[in-house]
Amino acid sequence: MSSPVHHHQYLYADYIALEQHSPVRHEFWAGEIYAMAGGTPEHAALAAAILRAIGNQLPSGCRTYTSDLRVRMQASDVTTYPDGAVICGKVVPAIDDAIAATNPILLIEVTSPSTEAYDRGAKLEHYRSLSTLQAVVVLSHREARVDLISRNVDGAWTSAVFMAGTSFQIDSLGIVIVVDDLYENIA
């Protein structure tokens, strides 16, 4: 019989101290700290394309944020850096982290071979715990495909897939994005 592996349980204050001095970004998962992998040029281009498309249509008072924005899901004790975000109004910081936002209306993830299952699974579930969140956009690294996961007025979540040759609307922001525009010139 094998023994379970014991993981060190870090305090959130340990995580904040690490982030202040580390050139590498980390995620915090209920006492565990994980280094985040770097992205490819295609990953960066897709993130920039979706942020540009959204930013050009945002209503007044809303703003796009890059992957430098730390987002805290206090209910599940998880903190991460999505590939992009939209916040309307002022950033509401976490109680225990003055530079981590808690009020995004939209989060964006670009998948990669090493993060695809995580982006579409556990990470998405944690994102859904944010009361302000209205939608998550997941862009595939494999093909021209966008998954739009949206919260309905009754609070239920729905998911739709949009492929090349289609467009999608983010109702909470009143914007429309053409899938082909996002993947133009992406290798």
Image (cartoon, grey):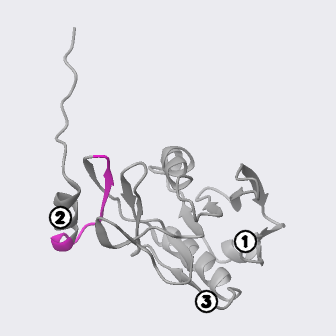
| Mark-to-mark CA distance, 2 and 1 | 35 Å
Q: Where is residue 122 in the image (x, y as percent from the top left)?
A: 49, 44
The numbered disc on residue 18 is 2
Q: What element carries label 2?
A: helix
Check the image and report above or below for 32 versus 146: above
- Kindly identify the amino acid type of the residue bearing the numbered disc 3: Gly
Residue 127 position, x and y percent, is 52, 55
Q: What stretch is highlighted in magenta?
A: 20-30
Q: What residue type is labelled 1?
A: Ser
The disc, 3 or 2, on the residue closer to the chain's N-terminal end is 2
User: Which picture quadrant has residue 174?
Assistant: bottom right
| Label 3 with label 2: CB-CB less than 8 Å | no
Single out the mark in the foreground, 3 or 2.
3
Q: Residue 172 carries which label?
A: 1
Residue 16 image position (x, y, % from top left): 22, 65
Identify the residue under disc 3.
61
